[in-house]
Image (tube, helix red, strand yellow):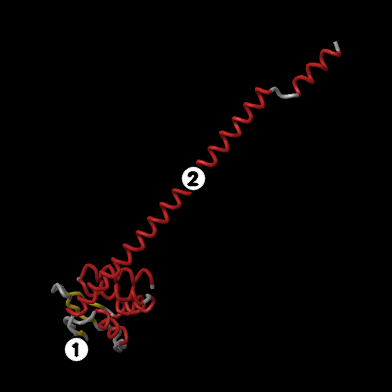
C-alpha cells in the first residue's frame, strides 16, 4: 500500500505534456494581450500628440486673429482728454485702461468721496468707474503678461458687458 501512494504522488508531481501545452498556450495568449495593449497605448499616445499639435496650431492662429482684431479696435478708440466737473471726470472714447490708471492715481478728497470716471464704449454705451474698480483693473493689468494685457485692454474697451467681465476678473484675482 505504501508503494501505491508513492507512485501516485510521484506521478502527480510531474506535469503531463497536456498541462505543459496548456500553460504554454496561456502564456502565449497573455503575452499577445500585453503586446496588443502596448500597441493600443502607443496609438492612443500618438493620437493625443497629434491632437495637441493641432490644438496648438489652432490656438496660435486664433491668438493672431485676436491680436489683429484688437489692433483694429484700438485704432477705432480715439484718445481725448478728460474734463473734471466737480468730483466727476468725464471721459469719452478714451482707453478704459488709461482712465483706470488716472482714476487710481487720484487722491481721495478730504471728505472721503472718490471721483468717478464715465467711460463711453465704441458701441455708445456708458459705464461709471470708481476709484476701487480702477485700482483693481490697474493691478490686474500689471500682473498679466504682454499678450494677455492686450486681450484685457480689448475687453475693457469693447462694450459694457465685456468691461464688467474684465472688472469681475480683476476683483476676484487681485
* Left or right of 144 on screen, residue 78: left
Residue at image location 49% in from the left, 45% down from the top: 39
Farthest-out residue, top: 1
Q: Nearer the viewer, residue 161 or 77?
A: 77
Q: Earlier in the sequence, mark 1 or mark 2?
A: 2
Mark 1 vs mark 2, foreground winner is: 2
Q: Quadrant of the C terminus?
A: bottom left
Question: What residue did someone put label 1 on?
Answer: 81
Residue at image location 30% in from the left, 73% down from the top: 152
Where residue 35 appears, x then y in whole percent?
Answer: 53, 42
Residue at image location 59% in from the left, 30% down from the top: 25
Residue 79 quadrant: bottom left
* Left or right of 85 on screen, residue 5: right
Circle 1: is it few (<14), some (14-19), or many (20+) Cα within 10 Å? few
Q: Nearer the viewer, residue 111 or 15?
A: 15
Where residue 151 appears, x then y in whole percent?
Answer: 29, 72
Whole-Å distance between the Cαs marked 1 and 2?
67 Å
Where residue 71 appears, x then y in whole percent?
Answer: 23, 77
* Left or right of 141 on screen, residue 94: left
Farthest-out residue, left: 124
Circle 2: is it few (<14), some (14-19), or many (20+) Cα within 10 Å? few
Residue 99, above or below 158: below
Residue 159 quadrant: bottom left
Where residue 87 appears, x then y in whole percent?
Answer: 22, 86
Q: Secondary structure at mark 2?
A: helix
* Left or right of 52 on screen, residue 129: left
Question: What residue did someone put label 2 on?
Answer: 39
Q: Quadrant of the N terminus?
A: top right
Amino acid at each position: 500500500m505504501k508503494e501505491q501512494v508513492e507512485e501516485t504522488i510521484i506521478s502527480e508531481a510531474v506535469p503531463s505534456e497536456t498541462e505543459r501545452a496548456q500553460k504554454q498556450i496561456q502564456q502565449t495568449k497573455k503575452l499577445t494581450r500585453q503586446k496588443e495593449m502596448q500597441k493600443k497605448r502607443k496609438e492612443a499616445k500618438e493620437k493625443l500628440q497629434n491632437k495637441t499639435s493641432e490644438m496648438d496650431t489652432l490656438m496660435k492662429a486664433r491668438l493672431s486673429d485676436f491680436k489683429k482684431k484688437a489692433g483694429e479696435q484700438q485704432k477705432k478708440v480715439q484718445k481725448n482728454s478728460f474734463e473734471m466737473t466737480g468730483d466727476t471726470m468725464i471721459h469719452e472714447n478714451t482707453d478704459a485702461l488709461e482712465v483706470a490708471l488716472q482714476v487710481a492715481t487720484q487722491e481721495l478728497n478730504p471728505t472721503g468721496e472718490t471721483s468717478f470716471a464715465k467711460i463711453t464704449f465704441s458701441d455708445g454705451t456708458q459705464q461709471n468707474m470708481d476709484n476701487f474698480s480702477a485700482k483693481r483693473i490697474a493691478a490686474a493689468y500689471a500682473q498679466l503678461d504682454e499678450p494677455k494685457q492686450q486681450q484685457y485692454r480689448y475687453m475693457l474697451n469693447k462694450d459694457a458687458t465685456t468691461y464688467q467681465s474684465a472688472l469681475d476678473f480683476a476683483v476676484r484675482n487681485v
